[in-house]
Image (cartoon, rainbow, N blue to C red):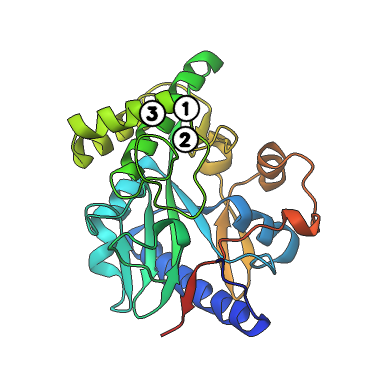
């Protein structure tokens, strides 16, 4: 059963998210690490100058070089109330990306409720890598990443109808053969090897002259190299944040038909199974 926010809870959640983002930005500035807002966070800054009123998360991106430095150096710099989660700091974490979580809070997502990991309120931190100019090569890279990511998640929670007991409220759509291949891959390879393969797939074009970055877990999250090399400052609630130079182009590529007030049934949020501010 998904959690239904009260207005007061959503307001407190937004305050906590701003707090986590503020600490993340502080660490980035101290370490001279570049970051930029992405996805719904960009929509919020563009239309609302803050978190979208019905939204419940914050997403930021970093180029691979900055992301790797963040993973290596941020844990020693974050305040005592915060935790940098990725699979090497929280071995059961099923995400290919990182999260900055706040201790003594709870944001328990139904999909991962049985995973024995830190479940605090979080800000997502995603690595961005270059994608090839060839659309065929890009599709191969995207599908390879998608398969390995499914294997990585399946090390901790089985989300499908086939080849095992589904451990989430509603099975995710996936055919029998991909499920079987995931089971075989996970029987042969440890989690660390799957992570290394994922990273290899994500970074394989970083040394070429590509002109776009992508999140790699989607096929539409493209940001031009120029937009990341020339970040702009935008107001985001009580904060000033870094954003891609051409935010409107990025958003229209990612969200065709973008509008400030989408239909109510399209206003998505995580809506956790349990929420606690500690």
Asked if residue 21 lies left or right of residue 260, the reply is left
Q: Which residue is mark 1?
A: 142
Left or right of 4? Residue 59 is: left
Q: Image quadrant of residue 206? A: top left
Callout count: 3
Q: What residue sits right under mark 3 in the picture?
A: 206
| The N terminus lies in quadrant | bottom right
Query: Dot 1, how many residues are within 10 Å of its Cα: few (below 14), some (14-19), or many (20+)?
Result: many
- The secondary element bearing badge 2 is classed as loop
Which label's residue is closer to the chain start, 2 or 1?
Answer: 1
Compared with 64, 53 (above or below) is below
Residue 169, percent from left and from top: 49, 55
Residue indicated by mark 2:
216
Q: Quadrant of residue 47?
A: bottom right
Q: Is residue 235 above or below residue 171?
A: below
Say which mark, if any, is on residue 261. Answer: none
- Image height of 198 relative to 8, above or below: above
Q: Which residue lies at the image location 56% right of the left edge and 36% below the top edge?
A: 226
Front one among 258 and 170 = 170
Disc 1 vs disc 3: which is toward the camera? Answer: 1
Q: Closer to us: mark 3 or mark 2?
A: 2
| Residue 128 place in picture, x, y as percent | 44, 40
Instruction: State if disc 1 and disc 2 touch (CB < 8 Å).
Output: yes
């Amino acid at each position: 059963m998904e959690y239904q926010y009260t207005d007061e809870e959503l307001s407190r959640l937004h305050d906590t998210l701003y707090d986590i983002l503020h600490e993340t930005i502080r660490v980035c500035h101290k370490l001279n690490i570049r970051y930029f807002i992405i996805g719904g966070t960009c929509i919020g800054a563009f239309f609302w100058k803050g978190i979208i009123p019905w939204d419940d998360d914050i997403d930021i991106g970093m180029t691979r070089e900055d992301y790797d430095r963040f993973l290596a150096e941020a844990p020693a710099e974050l305040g005592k109330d915060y935790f940098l989660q990725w699979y090497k700091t929280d071995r059961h974490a099923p995400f290919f990306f990182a999260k900055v979580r706040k201790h003594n809070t709870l944001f328990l997502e139904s999909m991962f409720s049985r995973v024995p990991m830190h479940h605090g309120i979080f800000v997502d931190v995603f690595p961005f890598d270059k994608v090839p100019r060839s659309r065929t090569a890009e599709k191969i890279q995207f599908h390879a990443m998608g398969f390995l990511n499914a294997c990585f998640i399946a090390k901790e929670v089985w989300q499908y109808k086939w080849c095992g007991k589904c451990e989430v409220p509603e099975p995710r759509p996936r055919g029998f053969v991909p499920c079987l291949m995931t089971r075989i891959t996970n029987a042969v390879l440890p989690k660390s090897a799957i992570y290394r393969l994922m990273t290899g797939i994500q970074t394989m074009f970083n040394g070429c002259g590509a002109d776009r970055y992508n999140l790699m877990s989607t096929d539409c999250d493209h940001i031009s190299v120029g937009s990341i090399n020339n970040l702009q400052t935008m107001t985001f609630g009580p904060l000033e944040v870094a954003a891609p130079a051409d935010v409107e182009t990025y958003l229209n590529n990612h969200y065709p038909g973008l509008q400030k007030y989408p239909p109510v049934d399209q206003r998505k949020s995580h809506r956790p199974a349990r929420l606690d501010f500690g």
